[in-house]
Image: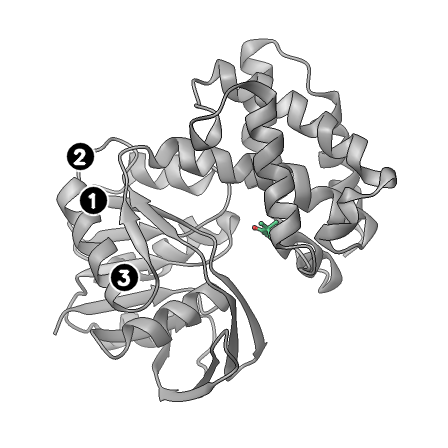
Amino acid sequence: MTTHWILGPGAIGRLLAHSLAPLVDVSVIGRRALPSRQLLTAPEGKVRVQHLTSLTAKQLVADAPEPPAFVHITTKAMAAEAALSSISSVLPSSTSLVLWQNGFYAQPRITQTWPGPVLCATTTQGAYLTGDDGVVHAGRGPTFVGDLDNQHTGLAEALAALLSEAGLTASAVPDIRSRLWQKLAVNAAINPLVALHGVRNGELRGDAYSGRVMAVVQEAVAILTKEGVLPPNGGEGDAAWLALVWQVVENTANNKASMLQDVEAKRLTEREAILGPLIECAERYGLRCEVLKGLDQELALLEARF
Ligand code: KPL
């Protein structure tokens, strides 16, 4: 049986662990150990109990177990590099990594520095935690897997096949870079606004917010076009990007976005991984990004109070 380590026992990490556990040997690694008896509530409401191996990074390093075939990093974007460093002493440098972060921060940094294959995954599976022993799989959606330099197509195909067999429908794609930026653009249009105003995603459709959503999309599209990112779904121009954003708002109308959940829990948000790369590109290309900068500053002020 191949071994998969899942570094970061958040909602996506635990969903992945529950899904893969019947097929491969899985260990969940975090800063603190979780109870081994874990519950998964499926989108249809059925609850499944599974015993998962959970270790702290310190325990893992002390035990020095056989290296895994894959390490999935499912931490928040800004924590990914530190999480990897915490176990790298027991990882051969040829180990395959899979990065599940939002934004476009951890992916290029780890791809440049890790000697082995680095796959990136982007998913629209919805999941949230209900405590130390429970995760709810709130909604199904596709997962796309690939590497930024298209050098590991076979590995991405093998992983996508395994994920699909585990019930998390996945495809290997040659354009993961564009797909990561497309998700980033959607997150930039939705997450900061809902997090700052404490509203669910669907509220963005109203007059109070829709103009601000469009302003973010307009700035983001100008930046992404310069960066060579293709519009989503084979469409063209601002209209394709806006259509995607409104479609996600509609599909997730009742959701509390991850950034709002972070603000409510007084955790640092993913603003640096979502707004940061857009602002950095805008500055590099000499493009205006007042709206994006304004949101970033408002979030920074809010985080400073935590
Ligand atoms: O990805 C999301 C998030 O919450 O981070 C969206 C798509 C905005 C859904 O809430």
Of residue 105 and residue 15, the one placed in the foreground of this image is 15
Q: How many marks?
A: 3
Q: Identify the residue position indicated by label 1 in the image.
A: 117
Task: Judge by depth and name the residue closer to the eye, 296 or 150.
Answer: 150
Q: CA distance from mark 3 to mark 2?
A: 22 Å
Q: Earlier in the sequence, mark 3 or mark 2?
A: 2
Label 2 crowd (10 A; few <14 / some 14-19 / many >=20): some
Q: Label for residue 42? A: none
Q: Nearer the viewer, mark 1 or mark 3?
A: 3
Spot occupied by residue 40 in the image (x, y as percentages of width and height):
46, 81
Residue lying farthest to the top in this orientation: 286
C-alpha span from label 1 to label 2: 8 Å
Distance from the alpha carbon under mark 1 to that under mark 3 = 21 Å
Q: Residues within 10 Å of mark 1 (few under 14, many from 20)?
A: some
Amino acid type of disc 2? Gln
Q: State which quadrant residue 241 falls in.
A: top right
Q: Which residue corresponds to mark 3? A: 164
- Residue matched to label 2: 151
Q: Are marks 1 and 2 in contact (CB under 8 Å)?
A: yes
Location of the N terminus by quadrant is bottom left
